[in-house]
Amino acid sequence: MFKAVISVNFKKSILDPQGNAVLKALNSLGYQNVEDVRIGKHIEVMLDCENKDKAKEQLNEMCDKLLANPVIEDYQVEVVEVGR
Amino acid sequence: MFKAVISVNFKKSILDPQGNAVLKALNSLGYQNVEDVRIGKHIEVMLDCENKDKAKEQLNEMCDKLLANPVIEDYQVEVVEVGR
């Protein structure tokens, strides 16, 4: 059994309105030292697979097909083996 | 300058309908080996602060006040120092 942590974020060149709204909210709450906020998705996937390489390969496929939009988003996949 | 990566997720006891929808979608795309999906937020914050401890303290405050709902969500904060 493997646990994957995937983070999906807008590419640097893409505007992030949700992040900007949170930045303004933090500034107006008194956190003037906050300079940038970007908000993306944090996805945890539990999957059963023969080995870690195969798991990683499948997860990259899932990201390309469903979890991320490769046109505007980047993703990072981390896989760790866990017990049942 | 510090960069913080915050992940905000529903507590284990809270249902995650978005995660369930993605789980079903992955299963129907042929990934029958996927057993669980949980979806949360991935927040990156750049902030200026004297030291790492102070930054972490402020970030925990921000999570409690704005970034997470402590009633139904857990959060994790990781801070690294970065150049300007």
Image (tube, coloured by chain):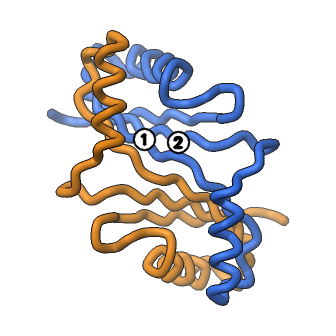
Chain colours: A orange, B blue
Label 1: chain? B
Residue B78 in picture, x, y percent from top left: 47, 36
Q: Which residue is mark 2?
A: B7
Mark 1 and mark 2 residues within 8 Å of each other at the beta carbon = yes
Q: Is residue A5 positioned above or below B49 on the image?
A: below
Q: Amino acid at mark 2?
A: Ser
Q: Residues within 10 Å of mark 2 (few under 14, many from 20)?
A: many
Q: Is residue B6 left or right of residue A33?
A: right
Q: Farthest residue in the left direction?
A: B84
Residue A21 position (above or below residue B55): below
Disc assigned to residue B43: 1
Q: Quadrant of residue B47?
A: top left
Question: Which residue is located at x 48 percent, y 77 percent?
Answer: A60
Name the residue nearer the viewer: B82 or B77: B77
Mark 2 secondary-structure assignment: strand
Residue type, numbered disc 1: Ile
Q: CA distance from mark 1 to mark 2?
A: 6 Å
